Image (tube, grey):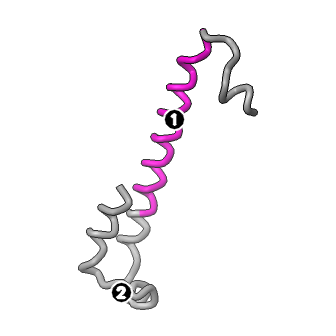
Amino acid sequence: MNAVLRPAVPSLLPLRGLQQWWHRAALVRRQKAEARALMALGQHELNDLGVGRSELPALVREAD
């Protein structure tokens, strides 16, 4: 696995940038999905978490 992350051949170095882009894109997708799930919670579930509906936009922005 480490051989893929640290290629011995310099011609494979551009793949490292592609890998980093892929991981960032996956992170953004995951954060957006979590934000949608959080916004979809009902008031009862939010009360259980100790979060008010008015606090959700700030929580979603912090995740970005």
Q: Position of residue 33 (x, y in %)?
A: 44, 58
Q: Which mark is residue 43?
A: 2
Q: Quadrant of residue 37?
A: bottom left
Q: Horizontally, is 5 left or right of 22 in the view?
A: right
Q: Residue furthest left?
A: 54
Residue type at numbered disc 1: Trp
Q: Where are the magenta residues, as a range?
A: 11-34
In the rendered image, residue 51 lying in the magenta stretch gets the answer no
Q: Horizontally, is 19 left or right of 38 in the view?
A: right
Quadrant of the drawing holding the C terminus: bottom left
In the rendered image, residue 33 lying in the magenta stretch gets the answer yes
Quadrant of the drawing holding the N terminus: top right
Q: Residues within 10 Å of mark 1 (few under 14, many from 20)?
A: few
Q: Name the N-terminal-most of marks 2 and 1.
A: 1
Q: Position of residue 58 (x, y in %)?
A: 27, 69
Q: Which mark is residue 22?
A: 1
Q: Residue at x 33, y 63 (%)?
A: 62
In the depicted view, which residue is nearer to us: 38 or 16? 16
Q: Residue at x 55, y 30 (%)?
A: 19
